[in-house]
Image: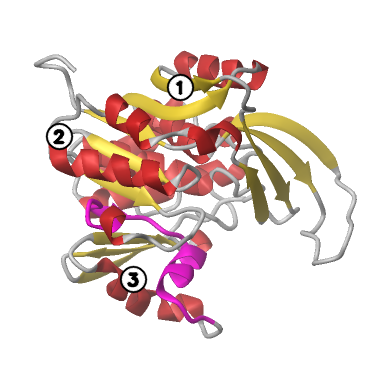
Amino acid sequence: MSDGAPPRLVVVGSLNLDRVSEVVALPQPGETVLAVRSSSSLGGKGANQAVCAARHGVAVAMVGCVGDDRDGAELVSSLATEGVDTSGIRVRAGCPTGAAQVTVAADGANCIVVAAGANGELTPADVRSALSRLRPGDVVLIQLEIPIGAAIAAAGAGAAAGARVILNPAPAQPLPAELVRGVDVLVPNLNELVALTGGGGGDLLAEAPARANALAGDRSVIVTLGEHGALVVDRGEQTRVPAPRVEAIDTTAAGDAFCGSLASELLHGRPLLHAARVAVQVGALATTRRGALSGLPLRSEIADVIARSEGGQVAGPSPSASRRTVAR
């Protein structure tokens, strides 16, 4: 990055081909169900979050790995079309691009199984090279569909450069101390919060504030709570951010829309609570259509959310809202 260039968001994460099956209800263990319809689309937590951020109008770079195949080439091309800098994406010969099997129920609930493919080939050296020009004011956004060593390298590079580091710990797994100490904002959903803090079996929503406090330490924590919005823990204070009521048909991209939006607002210098309020709205919009990248809100929709937030209306329902929301 040259002197005078605007701050940028660097997303370090996964790029996948999503294979989506729509069903009436999610199958139980041992149960076989027929899909109402099936499709394929581009996705991956990293790619989804990068595209959502680009639609906020911020400078975004993607760091990750794809295979030397048609899926990988299409992913890179799609990101470039969205305005994402793809120079940090490595191509691994002989390794397939990552894939995700996404099953979506009629009520919008989903379950996802990921085959890492080339995502598993992202090395700490790749990350350090791609992040070598970070500077204060930049934001680094990380997920855990990549090797933990690559995530640690990203957090360390961000912290060393004075950039703000956001970690979306999905899928949930034990977080090494060397990863956590480089993180400024931790963004789990409720299930990930429980996995990170242990226990479970009680009223998880009621337990969320205590669990978030235990996880926070000297960093901020934002817990996404689906139709209940989000819980923000910052500097010892807790604030619940309500969600608008919308007709949710697919929650697949909601959490990624939330994270991409949050990171973008923080890059713009917005306070954490304001950024979370905007992110809840954008995440809710992502539940109103099908797909991952295809389900992300459009630039015009995000611009409308931001305009309403600046007018003090962001906490209320959007004009097109109707029933329930999920922002996982």
Query: In front of the other: label 1 or label 2?
Result: 1
Q: Say which quadrant the N terminus sits in.
A: top left
Q: Amino acid at mark 3?
A: Ala
For marks 2 and 3, the one nearer the N-term is 2
User: Residue 143: where, in percent of width, then height?
Assistant: 42, 45
List the residue tagged with mark 2. 137
- Range shown magenta: 180-200
In front of the other: 214 or 226: 214
User: Which numbered tag is attached to residue 217?
Assistant: none
219 lies left or right of 255: left
List the residue tagged with mark 1. 90
Dot 2 falls on a residue whose secondary structure is loop
Within 10 Å of the Cα at label 1, are there few (<14), some (14-19), or many (20+) other Cα atoms? many
List the residue tagged with mark 3. 212
The residues tagged by marks 3 and 1 sit, at their Cα atoms, a distance apart of: 35 Å
Q: Amino acid at mark 1?
A: Arg
Within 10 Å of the Cα at label 3, are there few (<14), some (14-19), or many (20+) other Cα atoms? many
Residue drawn at (48%, 49%) of the image: 255
For marks 1 and 2, the one nearer the N-term is 1
For marks 3 and 1, the one nearer the N-term is 1
Residue drawn at (47%, 42%) of the image: 146
User: Residue 57: where, in percent of width, then height?
Assistant: 33, 24
In front of the other: 183 or 291: 183
Image vertical order of residue 105 relative to residue 240, above or below: above
- How many tags in the picture? 3
The residues tagged by marks 2 and 3 sit, at their Cα atoms, a distance apart of: 26 Å
The residues tagged by marks 1 and 2 sit, at their Cα atoms, a distance apart of: 25 Å
